[in-house]
Image (tube, grey):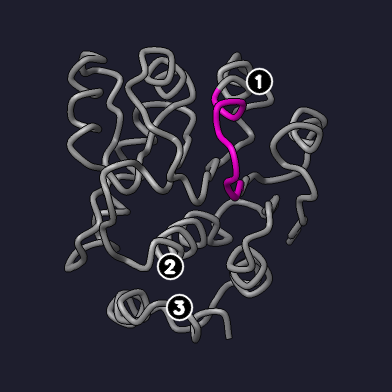
Amino acid sequence: MPFKKLHPHLKDVLENSEISVPTALQKASIPIIKSGANVFCFAPENSGKTTTLLLTTLNKLKCEAVGIAPRAVVLVENNDKALQLFDTFVKYTKRTSLRVYVADEKQHIDLLKSEIFEGVDILISTPKIMNKLLLLEGLNTTQLKIFNIDDADFLTKNTSTSDLMLITQSIHKCQFVMYAEKMHPTLKRFENYFMQYAKTVSI
């Protein structure tokens, strides 16, 4: 069972949320993501993609704060989704020392930089803001362990792809996990760049 080998804190959260049975996607993808491979996760809406992202990311970070540089990144389509995901992360990280931070595009970039420097474990951002932070040397990516892209379908229809390519070029040695509804030529192309040797889970 994919939930069995998760960090005890996550098992408690799932129990309190009355989630005892993994979805088909969770069953198939959690063990593969935990193995450290790059993974494409394809499944329709409401298949548990976001919960999979939360569980595997928090499990990878062992549910505790370490150092000051981000160890996990989640890229999302827009600011509203970033804030929404932040609220979900907060529910899962209560009673842990983990620091979740959303790079809110409504805030001045210098404020984001200084707050990130104070110490962050998980950074939630849009590609545009993350790329801006990197250009301004406001982000240390040397400690990154896992880099998630939530609902990556948005990359097939807007200009975020170029931001994403620039971001990933500045990251060395990190696990990449991409969640989307289905494979698309744009997403497939990433295999030649940062999604090398990626495994595919499709439901």
**Secondary element at image label 2:** helix
**Secondary element at image label 1:** loop
Residue position marked by numbered label 3 in the rendering: 6
Q: Which mark is residue 157?
A: 1
Decide whether residue 142 is among the magenta residues. no
Which comes before the other along the chain, label 3 or label 1? 3
Which comes before the other along the chain, label 3 or label 2? 3
Could you tell whether 168 is left or right of 137 in the image? right
> What stretch of residues is rendered in magenta?
167-176
* Number of marks present in the image shown: 3
The quadrant in which residue 91 appears is bottom left
Circles 3 and 1 in contact, beta carbons < 8 Å: no
Circles 3 and 2 in contact, beta carbons < 8 Å: yes
Could you tell whether 57 is left or right of 103 in the image? right
> Residue type at mark 1?
Lys
Which comes before the other along the chain, label 2 or label 1? 2
> Residue type at mark 3?
Leu
- Toward the viewer: 182 or 165? 165
Crowd class of label 3 (few under 14; some 14 to 19; many from 20; radius 10 Å) = some
Q: Nearer the viewer, mark 2 or mark 1?
A: 2
> Distance between the Cα atoms at labels 2 and 1?
32 Å
Residue at the image point whose x is 32% and y is 66% from the top: 63
> Residue type at mark 2?
Asn
Residue position marked by numbered label 2 in the rendering: 59
Tell me where residue 3 appears, x and y as whole percent. 49, 80
**Secondary element at image label 3:** loop
Crowd class of label 1 (few under 14; some 14 to 19; many from 20; radius 10 Å) = few
Residue at the image point whose x is 37% and y is 19% from the top: 133
- Toward the viewer: 180 or 174? 174
Tell me where residue 27 appears, x and y as whole percent. 63, 75
> Distance between the Cα atoms at labels 3 and 1?
35 Å
Could you tell whether 136 is left or right of 37 in the image? left
